[in-house]
Image: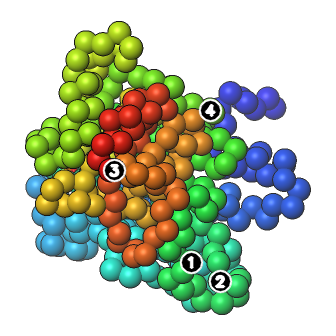
Amino acid sequence: MDVNRKVQTLDEFTIQQLRDFPHATGELSHLLRNLGLAAKRVNVEVNKAGLVDILGDFGTINVQGEEVKKLDVFANDQFTGVLKHGIACAGIASEELDDFVAFGDPKSVQSKYVCVYDPLDGSANIDVNVSIGTIFGVYRRVTPIGTVVTKEDFLQPGNKLVAAGYVVYGSSTMLVYATRRGVNGFTLDPSIGEFTLSHPDIKCPETGKIYSVNHGNFFKYAEGVRDYIQVCQQKDKKTGGPYTQRYIGSMVSDVHRNLIKGGIFMYPGTTDKPAGKLRLLYECNPFAFIVTVAGGKATNGKMRILDIEPEELHQRTPMFIGSLQMMEELESYQEKDNK
Ligand code: AHG
Ligand code: MN
Ligand code: MN
């Protein structure tokens, strides 16, 4: 029987990649399959979010007699549960949990990977039917295989990531992941319940016409950032401006769109919150890795996001990310902020 080779599932794709590496164990494929499974479960629940009033409010008991959980707690439970029960991850750190979790069972301690994630990004948008997402990163542990993981396995700079990805629960559901070899996007085909390769070898356009920033904070940004934002609004032959402002408030959706179409996303520090809002481990590093592999760039305004040595699990950082030329233009204005 002929199999339709046009449709390649996430599983088939990751297994195909293994053929080029005779010594690969398949552990990363296993891990990505687990992450895909958790994403599918979250997707089902996200699609029901509007039914909360009918099925029961958060904290109440639903018709199946289960407690209705906040969606970000539900998402965290799904990702943590699936990885804990799998055999390809030795521990996790999540934006939803105060501390990392070490999986101490005999199979998990034999695994070489740990995962970090923001199980539900853009959670303020859930109630209003706007795209939300999940962001994840995969590190090779630094402690010996066979032992229980420690905090230092998670406090690694982004340049040590083995893989990183995100899921957008949007008009369609997509999983995009990157390894050093490239970035590939998979769209969930609801008819077979599988992520299928839809965006092979994603490259971030060198430049674009979209800038994404919270304008409400404009007067709290550093001078160079304000100058750049004003440049984005001006007619300019060199930059091709004025640009279009697009800001959803779900970083996953904003950065996904800019990655595909070209653009720049900024969450700068403000006078009252110099480190901004976004978390280095769970949000910034995975995206910095993905966009860098795709040919773009990500900084904190001073240095590459990927080179920051993390000190705390929940550390925040300013974030500037996007198309290479737009980032270089921004940097020329940021010089004055770094004097
Ligand atoms: P989370 O829902 O995980 O807390 O993250 C929300 C983040 C990010 O997705 C988004 O870009 C940003 O918050 C929006 O913040 P502002 O409303 O301050 O612009
Ligand atoms: Mn988030
Ligand atoms: Mn979150």
The residue located at (39%, 76%) in the rendering is 312
Q: Which one is in front, 9 or 338? A: 338
Q: Quadrant of residue 91?
A: bottom right
Badge 3 amino acid: Asn
145, above or below 3, in the image: below
Most distant residue in the right direction = 22
**257 is higher (above) or lower (below) than 70:** above
Residue carrying label 3? 338
Q: CA distance from mark 4 to mark 2?
A: 34 Å
Q: Is residue 27 visible?
A: yes
C-alpha gap between disc 3 and disc 4:
38 Å
- Judge from the rendering whether residue 1 lies leftward or rightward of residue 276; answer left or right: right
Q: 248 or 315: nearer the eye?
A: 315
The residue where tag 2 is placed is 143
The amino acid sitting under disc 2 is Thr
Which residue in the protein does label 1 denote?
Answer: 153
Please give the residue where the numbered disc 4 appears in the rendered image: 200
The amino acid beneath tag 4 is Pro
Contact, CB < 8 Å: mark 1 with mark 2?
yes
Kind of residue indicated by mark 1: Asp
CA–CA distance in space, label 4 to label 1: 31 Å
